[in-house]
Amino acid sequence: MSKEVRACQIHSKDSVATALDEISMVDTVAVFNKSGDYLFSLTAFGSVPIGHKIALSDYDIGSIIFKYSQPIGKAYEAIHAGEHVHTHNLRGLRGRGDKK
């Protein structure tokens, strides 16, 4: 059953918002800025754990994803608006240090 949940876009340049509640498929996600102002709503494309990132629009493979107004990685596969953004579809731009 769908419900309305909240997510916070930290900076207006960000490609993602942080889930403030557990998000389930087809939930309505109300996106707010860090001042608490309502920005828009979107429909969840899948589950997103609390504290994780949710895509604010569609991104093609290779798209740069921003959080805190900084690039955090490239889309490793196509990402849909409302989808969980994490290591399964995002590759960091910096080396991990444990891989050559």
Image (spheres, rainbow, N blue to C red):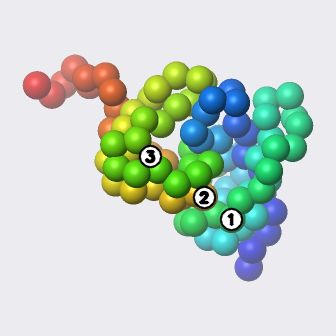
Q: Quadrant of the N terminus?
A: bottom right
Kindly tell me whether residue 87 is visible in this rendering.
Answer: no
Kindly identify the residue that appears in the image at 52 percent across and 22 percent down. Answer: 70
Q: Which kind of residue does numbered mark 3 sit on?
A: His
Q: Which kind of residue does numbered mark 2 sit on?
A: Gly
Q: Give the SS element for disc 1.
A: strand
Identify the disc placed on residue 82: 2
Instruction: State which mark lies toward you, 2 or 3.
Output: 2
* Residue 34 pos. (x, y %): 79, 29
Residue 36 left/right relative to 15: right
The residue carrying mark 1 is: 43
Between 65 and 22, the one lying in front of the other is 65
Q: Give the SS element for disc 2.
A: loop
Q: Which kind of residue does numbered mark 1 sit on?
A: Thr
Number of residue marks:
3
Specify few, some or many for label 3: CA neighbours under 10 Å numbering under 14, 14-19, or 20 or more.
some
Q: Are marks 2 and 3 in contact (CB under 8 Å)?
A: no
Kindly identify the residue that appears in the image at 62 percent across and 49 percent down. Answer: 56
Name which of mark 2 and mark 1 comes first in the sequence: 1
* Residue 10 pos. (x, y %): 69, 30
Q: Are marks 2 and 1 in contact (CB under 8 Å)?
A: yes
* Residue 32 pos. (x, y %): 80, 41
Kindly identify the residue that appears in the image at 40 percent across and 41 percent down. Answer: 63
The residue carrying mark 3 is: 86
Between 89 and 13, the one lying in front of the other is 13
What distance separates the C-alpha of mark 2 from that of mark 3?
13 Å
Kindly identify the residue that appears in the image at 18 percent across and 25 percent down. Answer: 98
As displayed, is residue 14 above or below residue 20? above
